[in-house]
Image (tube, helix red, strand yellow):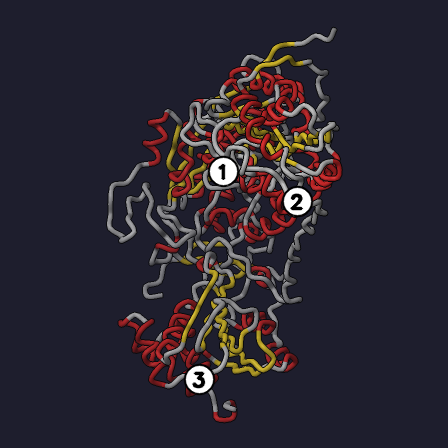
Amino acid sequence: MERTVFFSGNEAIAHGAVRAGAGFACGYPGTPSTEILETAAHLKGIHAEWCINEKVALETAVGASLAGVRSIVTMKHVGLNVAADPFMTLSLTGVNAGLVVVSADDPGMHSSQNEQDNRNYARFAKVPMLEPSDSQEAYDYLAEAFALSEEFDTPVLLRTTTRVSHGRGRVVPRVPVPVEPRDYARDISKYVMVPQYARVRNRLVLERLQALRLRSEQSSLNVLEAGTADFGIIASGVAYTYAREAFPKAWSLKLGMSNPLPYAKIARLYEQVSRVAVVEELDPFIEEQVRALGLPVIGKEAIPADGELDQDVVARALEPFVTRKAPRRRRPVFPPAPHITTPPEPPAGLPVRPPVLCPGCTHRSVYTGMRRHKLAPMGDIGCYTLGALPPLLALDSCLCMGASIGMMAGFNKALGRKGAAAVIGDSTFFHSGITALIDAYYNEAPGLVMVLDNRTTAMTGHQGHPGTGVRPDRTQGPAVDIQRLCEGIGVRCATVDANDYGALDTAIRAEVDAPGLGVIVALAPCVLTLRERAGEIVVDEERCNLCGLCIDIGCPAIAPGETAVEITDACTGCALCVEVCRRGALVRAGVEDGA
Amino acid sequence: MNGTTTVSLVGVGGQGILLAAAILAETAAAEGLDVKASEVKGMAQRGGSVLSTVRFGDKVWSPVARYADVVVATEALEGRRALGMLTPRGTLVCAATTRIIPGSVLRHEDEYPDDLAAAAAARGVRLLAVDAEGLAREAGTLRAVNVALLGAASTALPFSQESWRRGLAAAVPAKILEVNERAFALGRESVGEEDEQ
């Protein structure tokens, strides 16, 4: 007899993840998801950590995936609301190593504040979803989930409910899945979701969904099981077990992969029987899609739309419908593939005018200092995201507000060393960077966090934030000090004048070499908020040999002339170019009054 | 009036496209017309291209349009780029002497186009090439390039002088209204008799 173990669904998920080669697990506790991580914490070959919340947990798992380690992140249904920001854009970036997001839903609200049906998140984000119906499937599906994630370059949602997560059953262990290691390769068009790249990725997501539907048609997880009655059932998850027990003679289409739905398999069930019911807890998720095919179905008019089901509820709900006259047979109408726009061609031969960091912007100094070091810079959202583009190429990622620090932490934890840094603006740090920094401290993630503090929410037009105390009517309220906040957490922190390139360079060098976690606050007010120029730069044409070092900082005020570089009127006199020039060809001049 | 007229305003972030659009919208409203305007301004301060669209008529439904009857361009390259968005008999009012050099041209990767008049003729659109910088300087501030151009564009739009006056007063802050009124008048006068059809 085969060796079997007796696992809860949650234990099975943890063991299944390890069997599938997952090396990193994180999450935030929440019933009924909690035991997945608690189990993983005691298994060999996988690192498990609690995160400060579900958003940071997902961002941490994304970082680990980028570093090349298969990762799983666990949460309860409402937790995915907290993680929805990274989740929605992760669908666009896709993954490096496989990434599985477990959402454990709680129909009946045994210990929850609502009973939202997170299957809707799979459709919302256009990602594949697997729904195991017992412990064995929970164990087995992890291998399929990671394989799908890597093959289709997408996060996979593994959705359970209380009775799957907390139900127990026999599990036959399988041989481990061989997993090829995946190196990290920077790819800004894939990982930096600025509009120009996100538009391209979004089209790929729409195409991916079509490919996933084909996979769903072929998947062995979606099985049409023959019956003897003129009655068929479509079900997924634990509801499938209720339906099978209530109607043993019925045909059934068992959906292990419930997004996207296999339309042709659904149609095949309708070729066998004249009455079909969808048995599902909570929302008419499958039912509405079946109806959209033009097929008559027994659904939420019979099956309760709230609370948990069981075989008794299902039997009583469906019996009056099963004996009714069968509806007239209809042919399904499959929705055509959606029209996906082709990007408009820009007028040929005309130079484009992409947004750039302003002349005199001190983000440029930080990036110039950082790119001397090999740390992969996880980016965030603000003006500084513009530094991801050529010629600076200063950021490797941009996922969602506040994602940089969690991604850095996951990347470095998975790698076991300081391989990534985080770059985040002051307003974004207050938005959702603080929680990730606390998390990185608690989980002992090494790394360098660069806070670009330009004393305003610059990108959106210089709004106030808690670090400045400025209110919408421009009056002054209390302000939070970032350095004291970091030190209060327990994180090493230094504040450096971002106009002082030498000091900045020294601070970055020291922090790159230091062990553990550290923050540098690069402080300088946004150049657009300053009324006066810092000075004037003149070119010593004898010395300039057009080597290009100053051009590489990407300043719109520097242009290569015929024999020497030229400084245009846009120059603010920040003098970063003076710092990077090795020949002394750029020099500060005295500021002329009334210039 | 019949149908809906579309005016697009294009330029580079910081050139006052949004103010010009506001003046135009207020002027159309002063004529008693329905007006809708929309713009994408997220990158407005970062040197990127800016586009604002103002549509007016008895009843305006959509706030956007792929093609414009009149394009007001505060920068020559952006005017050149906008030729493709003009209707066949449309008018391009362009600050032909205003050049804001993009980075790729500074780095010699691209060339700044020099074919505005020829390209406009090839497309069959009417070109009002305006020295808006010169007019703005004459009015008293280089920042009034946008309003000087609007003055030139006013010759191609069906609004009374009184409506323009009210439009300017409604949209322009009081302390810079006078200089902008001068720039508008200079722009309007700059369009010679031979240009008016």
Q: Are marks 1 and 3 on the same chain?
A: no
Per the model, the C-alpha gap separating discs 1 and 3 is 50 Å
Where is mark 2, residue-wise? A295
The residue tagged with tag 3: helix, strand or loop? loop
Comparing A237 with B63, the one in front is: A237
The residue tagged with tag 1: helix, strand or loop? helix
Is residue A11 shown left or right of residue A533?
right
Q: Quadrant of the N terminus of chain A?
A: top right
Is residue A82 shown left or right of residue A331?
left
Residue type, numbered disc 2: Leu
Q: Quadrant of the C terminus of chain A?
A: bottom left
Residue type, numbered disc 3: Pro
Residue B174 drawn at (x, y percent)? 27, 72
Residue B100 drawn at (x, y percent)? 51, 67
Per the model, the C-alpha gap separating discs 1 and 2 is 33 Å
- Circle 1 or circle 2, nearest the eye: 2
Could one spot residue B187 in this view of the protein?
A: yes
Above or below: residue B79 compared with residue B109:
below
Q: Are marks 3 and 2 on the same chain?
A: no
- The label number, if any, that marks residue A84 in the structure image: 1
Q: Are marks 1 and 3 in contact (CB under 8 Å)?
A: no
Is residue A431 shown left or right of residue B111?
left
- Circle 3 or circle 2, nearest the eye: 2
Comparing A270 with B146, the one in front is: A270
Q: Are marks 1 and 2 on the same chain?
A: yes
Seen at 54% across and 33% down, the residue is A303
Where is mark 3, residue-wise? B158
